[in-house]
Image (cartoon, helix red, strand yellow):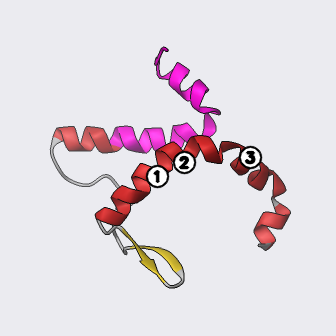
Amino acid sequence: MGWLEANQHVRIEMSRNATALAAVVRPGLLFALQSRAVFCTTTGLMLKPRAVPKTIGDGTQQTRAIQQAAHMLGRWLPSTGSLGTVLTLMGVQP
């Protein structure tokens, strides 16, 4: 709570983006729960130790390429702005 009080702007921005992010977060959270990478306890959600590796692991060339693309998108998407901006930058047209 102390961090949130010192960083009010984060809470304000999060409330603006929560609706748009829900469509992306919900399927990811369901997948994490189904694959048991995340599990529920009486204290909240817990991440299974070593469920998500910190580095891109071994595998086929295609697997490594997918992991690298996901890593790049995971770092890029939060800083781009609204969902409309992201879709425009990715070339998605109505």
Picture coordinates of residue 75, whole percent (x, y): 52, 43
Residue at screen point 75% across, 53% down: 10
Q: State the separation of the CA atoms marked 1 and 3.
A: 19 Å
20 magenta-colored: no
Q: Main secondary structure of the magenta part?
A: helix
Residue 81: image x %, image y %? Answer: 65, 33
Q: Pointer 1 and pointer 2: residues touching (CB < 8 Å)? A: yes
Number of other residues with Cα within 10 Å of mark 2, as a class: few under 14, some 14 to 19, many 20 or more: few
Name the residue that disc number 2 marks: 22
Residue 90 horizontal side relative to residue 66, left or right = right
Q: Secondary structure at mark 1?
A: helix
Closer mark to the observer between disc 3 and disc 2: 2
Q: CA distance from mark 1 to mark 2?
A: 6 Å
Q: Look at the image and say whether residue 85 sits in the magenta stretch.
A: yes
For the residue pair 23 and 85, the one nearer the viewer reads as: 23
Furthest residue to the bottom? 42
Q: Amino acid at mark 2?
A: Ala
Q: Circle 1: is it few (<14), some (14-19), or many (20+) Cα within 10 Å?
A: few
Residue that carries the numbered disc 3 in the rendered image: 13
Q: Are marks 1 and 3 in contact (CB under 8 Å)?
A: no
Give neighbour class at mark 3: few <14, some 14-19, many 20+ (Cα, 10 Å). few
Residue at image location 62% in from the left, 38% down from the top: 79
Quadrant occupied by the N terminus: bottom right
In magenta, the rendered stretch is 68-94
- Marking on residue 26: 1
Nearer the camera: disc 1 or disc 3: 1
Seen in the picture, residue 33 relative to 26 is either above or below; the reply is below
The reply to whether residue 87 is in sight is yes
